[in-house]
Image (cartoon, helix red, strand yellow):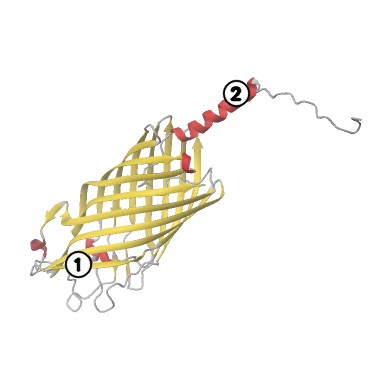
Amino acid sequence: MWAGVAVAAPTEPKFETAADTAANESDVRDEVSSRSSPPPPLGVRFGEPLEDRRFRVAYRFERLRRKGLLVGDSHVSPSRVLNRPPNFYDRTPRSLEVTVHTVQLAYAPHPRTTLIVEVPFVLKELETVDEFGRRTQEQTQGVGDIVLALVVPFIRRGGESSHVNIGFDIPTGSIRRGGSNTPLPFDSQIGNGTFDFEWGWTYRGEMDWLAWGAQAIGRHPIGRNGLKYREGSRFGTSVWGAVRLPAGLSTSLRFGWQKQNNTRTQERDLVTDPINDPSDNPKARGGTLLTLSPGLTLELPQLGNQRIAVEVEIPIHQDLDGPQLKQDWSIKAGWQWDF
């Protein structure tokens, strides 16, 4: 009466072979090794391409403060600037605070191609003082210049790798704050009004719980904007080292050098169109800056490969074409999620 009833044969238990065990241990070692070295500091421009993931969403907060005037590397007081030859300024900047909120979206259609778009929202607070000691504060805000970039891995050998990036800044930030009759100084404008070409080369090395790297970057405005001026080219280099700490933490130290060229503009008749403020002087916009930047990063693999980081930038030497506001400090904080 049991005819037609199929009885399943008992399945034999599966035992992991030595080869399977070795393969699994190798996978675990590879995974641990891939995340044992600390990431680049937050201040490194486009520090990591998307080689193992397809998308990245990131947010970065930056706050920068400038206060005090420099001519070369010497401090000068507002009283030595106002109504003194050769310029006879009737007002001068006293401080500038810049806050930037940046959203970044990255997409990797191929392991060797990362496409990036950055949208910044900028808030500037400029304080000036005139020849009578009266202080004035101006606040401007808006969407800054949007960045479109391409990052491509270049060379990889063992624990060393490098990549290049090229990009364009789109002139979406305003350069006409204050109106045509009383335009605000360069320092108060949200953008620079030109398409800018960006380039960069980044080298990274890693070994166990150590990482190190170097970067060279540049930005060059193309042509002049609608107000007939062009911001000067900017160059930068940095070197850094980082150490892995317990619990997903890593700490870093980065040394940076920045060079900003002066603004190029059409010649103006200083009798009919005088320069009243050093912030309006295109020949007082350039200079060099050396910085030291400690940083801290926390990786959160339990939250799907997320990361938060912070970096403080401290000037150690400035040589400015002045009189010009010197940099006091800068702080960056960021979050990113690769998936």
| Camera-nearest residue between 144 and 159 | 144
Classify 136 as above or below 163: below
| Left or right position of 201 against 233 | right
Q: Percent position (x, y) of residue 117?
A: 46, 57
Q: Percent position (x, y) of residue 241?
A: 35, 36
Q: How many residues crowd mark 1 within 10 Å: few (<14), some (14–19), many (20+)? A: few
Give the residue type at disc 2.
Ala
Q: Residue at x 25, y 50 (%)?
A: 289
- Residue 158 visible in rendering: no
Q: Percent position (x, y) of residue 181?
A: 25, 79
| Camera-nearest residue between 326 and 219 | 326
Q: CA distance from mark 1 to mark 2?
A: 67 Å
**Residue behind mark 2:** 22
Q: Residue at x 25, y 65 (%)?
A: 282
Among the two numbered marks 1 and 2 on one chain, the one whose residue lies closer to the N terminus:
2
Give the residue type at disc 1.
Gln
Res 151 label: none
Q: Percent position (x, y) of residue 297?
A: 37, 41
Which residue is outermost to the front? 1
Instruction: Give the structural element (helix, strand or loop) at label 1.
Output: strand
Residue 92 quadrant: bottom left
The quadrant the N terminus occupies is top right
Q: Residue at x 28, y 77 (%)?
A: 179
Instruction: Give the structural element (helix, strand or loop) at label 2.
Output: helix
- Residue 19 visible in rendering: yes
| Camera-nearest residue between 142 and 12 | 12
Res 137 label: 1
